[in-house]
Amino acid sequence: MKKGELKAIDYFTLLILGGTALCLVAFSPLAREGASKGLALAESTVLPSLLPLLIIFLTIMKTGAGALLSKAAGAVTHRLFNLPASCSAAIIFGLTGGYPTGAVLTEELYKNGEIDEKQARRLMRFNFCGGCGFIITAIGSAVLNNIRAGLILFFSNIISAVFVGIILSFTEKRDRYEYYYFSSPLPFGDALNSAVSGAVNSVLSITAYIVIFSAVSNIINIPDFLLPLLEITGGLCKVGFSIPFTAALLSFGGVCIHLQLTKTLSQIKMKYLDFLMFRVICSLLSYGAARLFLIVFPIETAVFADLSSRQVSLTSANIPLSLLLIAGCFVIVLDIGSKKSFANAVDKP
């Protein structure tokens, strides 16, 4: 293909983005109302549940505390996941801190040369979870008013992620365990300033995606059952699903979260379809784990109406435009992943 030659995906991307922009302009009152709701949602859920934890986790990773944690849990990480000891903190914080945390810390390890591309890709296949703050506090306590439901959702996601990580450990040769840590610890003040900057950038990115998705969905009236697949925070706060189905949706994460990870996927040369496949696998496992938890720890009062018992009217929504938006999201993700340059990647020591 000649340099500068346009491809079909370029025309389709222009169609999607141009059409979306026209909708935002033509229906600006609805767009502003949706954006305002999205901003309020991010302020009440993402900011309080994610930002403080992400600052703390990044600070630990950048100081000697991260090395200490990796040394303490390194043997377990090696035996369970066949990964270097330096991945311990990234896995613990990635599964408990919130969706972008695992990707942020994986990228940090890769930049520091503590893991190679294959190990980074393996981490990204399972080190993905809504975190205790979001799932237990925001979804369980605030949305469901049931802390037990939040715990079931959280541990269903954790179990599915850990199970996939263990299975993937057998896909590569198991090396002898050795502890090593390449990062030079920063003074606490420098580490904290760096962590605050990185955490704020990540949370602002999440907030921006929530706002744009809320603005668009308020215009085109996306069917309720599709909302969590696009933007997990607003979708679950607006629509009631069964606990097992909610666990599956939380494990999938939504296209909005996936878009935030394209930079990391590009740097480690991981195809989006690879990442997407494991999100589907983890979702199915989370669904099954939640059903088992409900057998052992039943919740008498239903906090969510089961999806199968809900009457969803598809005629009330602009289905073609909704499906076009979803297709456009995936096209943009694939396009970004295929065109990203690796020239700026940090050299490994």
Image (cartoon, rainbow, N blue to C red):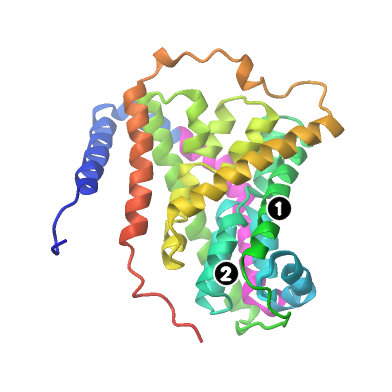
Q: State which quadrant residue 262 falls in.
A: bottom left
Indicate the position of residue 100 as horizontal and vertical percent values: 55, 55
Which segment did they paint magenta?
Answer: 37-66
Provide the major secondary structure of the magenta segment.
helix
Front residue (pair 78, 26): 78
Question: What amino acid is found at the position of numbered circle 1 in the picture?
Answer: Phe
Q: Which residue is mark 1?
A: 163
Image quarter of the N terminus: bottom left
Dot 1, crowdedness within 10 Å: few (<14), some or many (≥20)? some
Q: State which quadrant residue 290 falls in.
A: top right
Front residue (pair 109, 164): 164
Whether the magenta-drawn stretch holds residue 54 is answered as yes
Q: Which residue is mark 2?
A: 119
Dot 2, crowdedness within 10 Å: few (<14), some or many (≥20)? some
- Separation of residues labelled 2 and 1 (CA atoms): 17 Å
Secondary structure at badge 1 equals helix
